[in-house]
Image (tube, rainbow, N blue to C red):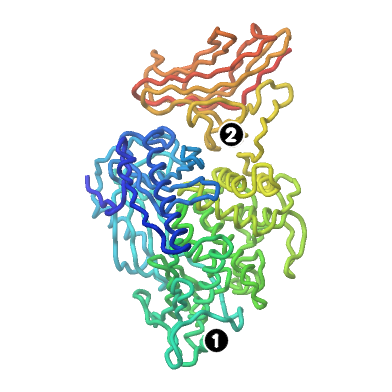
């Protein structure tokens, strides 16, 4: 087994977890600023220790098998109340796991509160490759339509799909046939050679920042030798590639500190465009969201500009963004919202790192649209006023229309307004539609209105009226959801959970803002997590509270991870109870206290689906028992097993008439043996009397 492993990273491994994260001594501070910095450092170190201990103690919570280790990514996010959130990447037998990342959420006292992750079960993957690394690189290079300049690869476990696979992640750098740069990431199956994922990290947008008019930009130097470099913003700077597509370029300089002429006859105009966009984006993240640059370490961005086939490229510390229309027209295409959009890809990459395909890819693109729009409003530039239209100053279509519409994404002819199970199959620039719609609804609400001279009329997918919570609150909620709760494989249902959790953190579970998040997600047809902390009442005559688990774990007692958010596996809605399925000796429980009134009869119905890797047709190796606990007596009213496996849900009807007039505990007990997984999916229960 060959592997390119990441060097120099702290690894958390099994029982030795806590010992691998050592703290340093904090010396007395010389002044208040030093004291604050050292206090923050000490809190970060303590959070790392506690997170490491949480992973070591609660490995089941993080779907961690004996071959899994965890590598810290970035610094902990520290809340004022003492809570902390620590992000980790997962490895399996030393191999990076795509889609295996987790966030550890710690209570103020340091104990484990919750976790964010998308991996549903512990990994079990063979690590013997049948395709060589060289062959995988050849397959990946064939995906680039243009000139290949360099190739790098590493062996990984791809857990982004439904079945984890041994794979190679190959990065192909070069220039596409239309002369735009390319940073193509291709995931190749190490057993079959099939291409599992392919996405270009060079995000292509459009804009024309000459529409921002005369602007003030941060520069350095002195008369006769000014530089387009801003020391107040982490040394944001702009360089001229002078027609090249690679390299660091030459820093723009000027004698009188007056840059460009607003037209393409002066190459510095493009430098101003990129530099101004970087300046606004840096200020927005720092002043509004409290993030100190893309990496949250004070580092600025380097914008590299060239006029090759009408493109302006801007790069930040190894990640690049590209603007252009490919038409051959000699004009820089960089508006404020596009600049904010492209640089926000860097923020996403350095937080949740949303995979650039499927639903997570749509959320990635929408996140850049969301923050690009927020930057445009933040800029308050009279020549390019804030709006919910993406790239409207560019006229890329030649008819005065923008690239995308956030109030009603379908106006572009390709983006959906509402989520559906088919959204993940669209190009990410279109699957972003529902999330763009969501942000508009959260910010402004539904219906017709005019903002900054632009008319909007935003519909809802459920016919409900949505009241906006304001763009400031919506931006802060989405940023916290991205930086604290989302992981690389987060889908739309997971985004709802992340955003609701973020709103609870920032404004409270019973706040107007949290309720606004709920209603906006429901308005784009994404159901799931709710804000309120009260127990949901039974539905109709149903005596079971939260019978379809759509309020998460409310009203239920469960073993870890039984109630889960996965719309692809439910009978209905976004939540279900998933017992067992580990392929190892394991017991899961789920229960609720139910008062059954005096009546002639009582009937329990439930929807059950059983999937199993067991091949026997005679032996019940893995079982699910439906039990009723009354006082000290436990009665098993039904037993299901691997012998009941089926391709779809089946409704089960059970007679509970012997328990009328009693308060009992309804219990599900799943027991799995040491080999071959069996999953029991339970959803949409009902207990009625007659």
Per the rendering, the mark at residue 185 is none
**In the rendered image, the vertical position of residue 360 relative to residue 322, given as above or below:** above
- Residue at coordinates 66% horizontally, 18% vertically from top-left? 687
The quarter of the picture where the N terminus appears is top left
Residue 500 lies in quadrant:
top right
Q: Are marks 1 and 2 in contact (CB under 8 Å)?
A: no
Residue 318: percent from the left, percent from the top? 38, 66
- Residue at coordinates 41% horizontally, 35% vertically from top-left? 63
In this figure, what is the number of numbered marks? 2
Residue 240: percent from the left, percent from the top? 41, 81
Q: Which residue lies under the disc numbered 2?
A: 552
Asked whether residue 356 appears in the rendered view, the answer is: no
**Of circles 1 and 2, which is in front?**
2
Q: Which residue lies under the disc numbered 1?
A: 263
Residue 541: percent from the left, percent from the top? 73, 21
- For marks 1 and 2, the one nearer the N-term is 1
Crowd rating for badge 1 (residues with CA inside 10 Å; few <14, some 14–19, many 20+): some
Say which of 454 and 140 sits in front: 454
**In the rendered image, the vertical position of residue 627 relative to residue 30, given as above or below:** above
Helix, strand or loop for disc 2:
loop
Q: Does residue 93 appear to the left or right of 526 in the view shown?
A: left
Residue 143 lies in quadrant:
bottom left
Crowd rating for badge 2 (residues with CA inside 10 Å; few <14, some 14–19, many 20+): many
Residue 564: percent from the left, percent from the top? 53, 34
Asked whether residue 287 appears in the rendered view, the answer is: yes
């Amino acid at each position: 087994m060959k592997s390119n492993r990441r060097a120099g990273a702290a690894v958390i491994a099994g029982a030795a977890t806590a010992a691998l994260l050592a703290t340093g001594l904090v010396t007395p501070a010389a002044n208040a600023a030093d004291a604050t910095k050292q206090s923050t450092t000490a809190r970060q170190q303590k959070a790392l220790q506690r997170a490491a201990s949480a992973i070591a103690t609660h490995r089941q919570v993080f779907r961690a098998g004996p071959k899994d280790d965890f590598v810290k990514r970035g610094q902990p996010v520290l809340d004022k109340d003492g809570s902390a959130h620590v992000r980790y990447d997962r490895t399996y037998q030393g191999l990076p796991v795509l889609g295996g990342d987790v966030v550890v959420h710690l209570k103020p006292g340091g104990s484990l509160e919750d976790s964010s992750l998308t991996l549903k079960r512990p990994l079990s993957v063979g690590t013997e490759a049948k395709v060589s690394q060289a062959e995988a690189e050849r397959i990946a290079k064939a995906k680039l339509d243009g000139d290949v300049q360099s190739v790098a690869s590493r062996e990984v476990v791809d857990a982004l799909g439904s079945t984890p696979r041994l794979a190679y992640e190959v990065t192909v750098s070069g220039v596409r046939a239309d002369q735009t740069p390319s940073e193509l990431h291709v995931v190749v199956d190490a057993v079959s050679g099939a291409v599992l994922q392919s996405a270009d990290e060079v995000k292509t947008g459009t804009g024309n920042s000459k529409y921002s008019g005369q602007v003030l930009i941060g520069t350095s130097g002195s008369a006769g030798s000014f530089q387009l470099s801003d020391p107040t913003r982490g040394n944001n700077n702009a360089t001229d590639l002078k027609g090249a597509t690679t390299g660091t370029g030459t820093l723009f300089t000027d004698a009188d500190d007056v840059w460009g002429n607003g037209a393409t006859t002066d190459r510095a105009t493009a430098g101003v465009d990129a530099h101004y966009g970087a300046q606004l984006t840096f200020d927005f993240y720092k002043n509004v969201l409290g993030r100190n640059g893309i990496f949250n370490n004070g580092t600025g961005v380097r914008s590299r500009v060239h006029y090759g086939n009408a493109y302006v490229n801007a790069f930040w510390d190894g990640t690049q963004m590209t603007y252009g229309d490919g038409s051959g027209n000699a004009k820089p295409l960089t508006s404020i919202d596009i600049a904010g959009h492209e640089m926000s890809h860097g923020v996403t990459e350095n937080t949740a790192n949303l995979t650039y395909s499927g639903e997570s890819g749509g959320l990635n693109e929408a996140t850049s649209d969301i923050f690009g729009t927020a930057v445009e409003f933040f800029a308050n530039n009279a020549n390019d006023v804030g709006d919910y239209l993406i790239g409207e100053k560019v006229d890329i279509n030649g008819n005065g229309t923008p690239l995308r519409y956030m109030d009603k994404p379908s106006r572009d002819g390709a983006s959906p307004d509402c989520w559906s199970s088919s959204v993940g199959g669209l190009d990410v620039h279109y699957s972003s539609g529902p999330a763009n719609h969501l942000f508009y609804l959260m910010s402004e609400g539904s219906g017709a209105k005019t903002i900054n001279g632009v008319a909007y009329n935003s519909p809802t997918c459920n016919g409900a009226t949505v009241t906006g919570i304001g763009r400031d609150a919506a931006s802060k909620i989405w940023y916290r959801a991205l930086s604290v709760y989302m992981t690389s494989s987060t889908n739309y249902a997971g985004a709802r959970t992340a955003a609701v959790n973020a709103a609870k953190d920032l404004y409270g579970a019973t706040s107007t803002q949290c309720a606004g998040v709920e209603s906006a997600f429901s308005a784009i047809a994404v159901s799931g997590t709710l804000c309120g902390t009260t127990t949901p009442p039974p539905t109709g005559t149903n005596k079971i509270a939260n019978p379809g688990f759509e309020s998460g774990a409310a009203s239920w007692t469960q073993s870890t991870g039984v109630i889960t958010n996965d719309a692809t596996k439910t009978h209905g809605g976004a939540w279900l109870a998933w017992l067992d399925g580990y392929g190892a000796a394991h017991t899961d429980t789920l229960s609720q206290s139910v008062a059954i009134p005096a009546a002639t009869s009582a009937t329990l119905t439930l929807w059950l689906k059983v999937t199993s890797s067991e091949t026997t047709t005679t032996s019940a190796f893995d079982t699910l028992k439906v039990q009723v606990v009354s006082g000290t007596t436990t009665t098993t009213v039904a037993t299901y097993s691997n012998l009941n496996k089926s391709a779809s849900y089946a409704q089960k009807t059970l007679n509970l008439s012997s328990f009328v007039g009693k308060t009992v505990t309804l219990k599900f007990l799943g027991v799995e043996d040491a080999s071959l997984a069996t999953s029991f999916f339970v959803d949409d229960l009902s207990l009625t009397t007659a």
